[in-house]
Amino acid sequence: MDKIQMVDLKGQYQKIKPEVDAAIQTVIDSTQFINGPAVKQFADNLAKYLGAKHVIPCANGTDALQIAMMALKLKPGDEVIVPAFTYVATAEVIGLLGLTPVMVDVNPQTFLVERKNVEKAITSNTKAIVPVHLYGQSCDMEPILELAKEQGLYVIEDNAQAIGADYTFADGHKAKTGTMGTIGCTSFFPSKNLGCYGDGGALCTNDDALAERIRMVANHGQKKKYYHSVIGCNSRLDTIQAAILGVKLLHLDEYCRARHDAAQYYTQNLLDVKGIEVPFEAGNSTHVFHQYTLKVADGLRDALKKHLEENGIPSMIYYPLPLQEQEAFHFITRTAESLDNAKQLSTQVLSLPMHTELTRETQDYIISTIRQFFE
Ligand SMILES: *Cc1c(COP(=O)(O)O)cnc(C)c1O
């Protein structure tokens, strides 16, 4: 058995090497490294895939979130509600723009923010909500969207971990994560479900005027070259990365399926182990398993991690410290309620190797090593 990895990017590349290599070579031959035709082509194809009107590529997922807040003209003093249990990027851009991040708790079973958490945190200064589709599953969006409508708030979906997931509304219609709010933001960081070979990101919206404003903000605040109407930034997806993503997008559904199959196999074989809780799958969302994350009980998480490590199995803690305890946020954070679930989850979560190339043989070894620990 090869060395076990959290993510196997090499095995995935080898299967599509001829297509990817040809796509990269085409860009090099054209020398259109910035804003070459592959960028628009990929954006159009991703829009089609997602069922969204506009996809605007940018340099990374963090930029996507920042550009979203700039395009919505959020100003210092405005409050933006974020889950306390997420990657730092979600809240970082809020602080960076001088806005106030307001952290709220998450559901301990799904790890996701819900309407009832958000509701308690709304004040007259609240302008936006950032639901994070953490680990690859959609937040329960319908109640959040209703709340946002009632209160006149923007919804900025952080879809960095869930691209490809489907949410089902009460009336049965489905939508892809990232297309339901005012703006959806995603990342093409190599280990994400749709990853390139460097940095990349995108925003997605169904609003024509907003799409135009997003393009302007991401391009130095200009619509016409050298005429700058607002302070913007410089955030582009490289043509080479767009070409690679164009190839990988064709495989995204197959990748989602592979991850889901691997997750099912873990779950079937770990469900009865006392001391761990397997991931909860909500009825109204598909789960694309960016991470397969266990909850480990009774302070055993770190010992299990060590046991896995001693047996050559990597595992990761996403995330060891909730946002409210991060030093960077001490001075600007406002919290509306206790963040006990976020705090407790940070001591319980453990993500197992999860990628598109995981073999049953590897999974069997991981499963038996976990079972051995609890025997
Ligand atoms: C990866 C990630 C981001 C940031 O994406 P980058 O491309 O690394 O800037 C933002 N939010 C979440 C939840 C992420 O997982």
Image: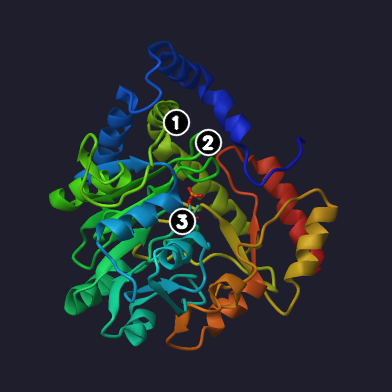
Question: Is residue 81 visible to the viewer in this orientation of the structure?
Answer: yes
Residue extending furthest toward the left: 209
Q: Quadrant of the N terminus?
A: top right
Horizontal side of residue 358 vs 190, given as left or right: right
Residue beneath disc 1: 241
Decide which of tag 3 and tag 1 comes sooner along the chain: 3
Spatial separation of the CA atoms under disc 3 and disc 1:
22 Å
Q: Quadrant of residue 253?
A: top left
Which percent across, then down, holds residue 189?
A: 51, 43
Pointer 2 local density, CA inside 10 Å: few below 14, some 14–19, many at least 20: some
Q: Nearer the viewer, mark 3 or mark 2?
A: 2
Q: Quadrant of residue 238?
A: top left
Name the one closer to the observer, 306 or 26. 26
Residue beneath disc 2: 198
What amino acid type should be assigned to the residue bearing mark 2? Gly
Tell me which residue sits at (46%, 53%) in the image: 161
Residue beneath disc 3: 136
